[in-house]
Image: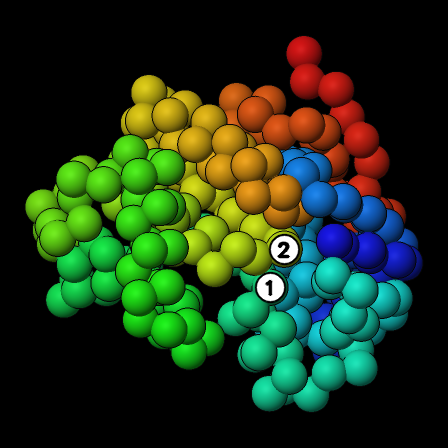
């Protein structure tokens, strides 16, 4: 689902700064990895490149067999909408839409037939334990419930790749643990490839593998 080969990113300037080089990663369906790194190591930059929101200076990225370098901005936008799902530390839930409509946004952008869209939304809300909250407004939800809504929205359209950037940073430990378990379960059940970017060793332990991002690339690490 994801193939990264010899990826590099350098910011230009009087003194050019290489964020990282020689990043290699392959993920198949159902694989879920955590990427850790020091502050400023480029974790979020790496996600931005994978999402096609920025261009790498070296190397290649393929998502579901499609090379991002061969796509223009419109094609990248279409690829993101159809094959990727995103979960962030900030929930990015629209306050004026109820839970069901927030979750259904990706389907609206893909022109999914209304009846089919409603069925998908109902199924994913049931899977994350929020079926009884479909008509609730965001202001009526807890932080953990809001993050569950964000996960449902990221997965409702059946993406091939899920990118999660510090998704539990605003949650208490107990709620964070519940959200991490849910995210892992849903990525696995949908046979997506998943990347969790985090500074938390506890959060990283929920993944199949833990990778450390350094200037020279990614290396697998074992958590004590």
For this view, does 103 lie left or right of residue 187? Answer: left
Q: Are marks 2 and 1 in contact (CB under 8 Å)?
A: yes
| Picture quadrant where residue 219 is located | top right
For this view, does 139 lie left or right of residue 200? Answer: left
Vertical order, 74 against 182 (above or below): below
| Element under disc 1 | helix
Residue at 37 percent of width and 64 percent of height: 116
- Figure colour scheme: rainbow
Judge the density around disc 2: few (<14), some (14-19), many (≥20) Cα neighbours within 10 Å: many
Give whichever of discs 2 and 1 has the lower sequence position: 1
Residue 164 or residue 166, whichever sits in front: 164
The disc placed on residue 83 is: 1
Is residue 194 shown to the viewer in this render? no
For this view, does 79 lie left or right of residue 132? Answer: right
For this view, does 125 lie left or right of residue 65? Answer: left
Can you give x and y, in whole percent of width and height, for residue 36 in the image?
A: 65, 37
Judge the density around disc 1: few (<14), some (14-19), many (≥20) Cα neighbours within 10 Å: some
Residue at 57 percent of width and 25 percent of height: 206
The disc placed on residue 54 is: none
Residue at 23 percent of width and 56 percent of height: 100
Mark 2 — residue? 160
Vertical order, 73 against 121 (above or below): below
Residue at 14 percent of width and 66 percent of height: 96
Can you give x and y, in whole percent of width and height, for residue 37 in the image?
A: 66, 39
Quarter of the rendering occupied by the C terminus = top right
Can you give x and y, in whole percent of width and height, for residue 185 in the image?
A: 51, 31
Is residue 69 shown to the viewer in this render? yes
């Amino acid at each position: 689902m994801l193939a990264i080969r010899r990826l590099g990113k350098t910011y230009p300037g009087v003194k050019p700064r290489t964020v990282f080089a020689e990043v290699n990663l392959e993920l198949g369906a159902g694989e879920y990895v955590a990427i850790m790194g020091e502050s400023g190591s480029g974790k979020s930059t790496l996600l931005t490149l994978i999402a096609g929101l920025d261009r790498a200076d070296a190397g290649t990225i393929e998502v579901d067999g499609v090379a991002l370098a061969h796509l223009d901005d419109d094609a990248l936008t279409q690829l993101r909408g159809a094959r990727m799902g995103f979960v962030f530390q900030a929930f990015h839930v629209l306050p004026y839409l109820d839970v069901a409509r927030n979750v259904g946004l990706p389907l609206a952008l893909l022109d999914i037939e209304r009846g089919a869209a409603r069925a998908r939304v109902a199924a994913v809300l049931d899977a994350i334990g929020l079926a009884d909250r479909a008509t609730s407004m965001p202001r009526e939800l807890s932080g953990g419930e809001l993050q569950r809504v964000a996960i449902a929205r990221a997965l409702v359209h059946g993406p091939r790749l899920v990118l999660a950037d510090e998704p539990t940073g605003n949650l208490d430990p107990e709620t964070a643990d519940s959200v991490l378990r849910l995210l892992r379960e849903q990525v696995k059940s949908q046979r997506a490839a998943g990347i969790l970017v985090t500074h938390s060793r506890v959060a990283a332990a929920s993944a199949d593998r833990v990778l450390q991002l350094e200037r020279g690339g990614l290396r697998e690490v074992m958590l004590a």
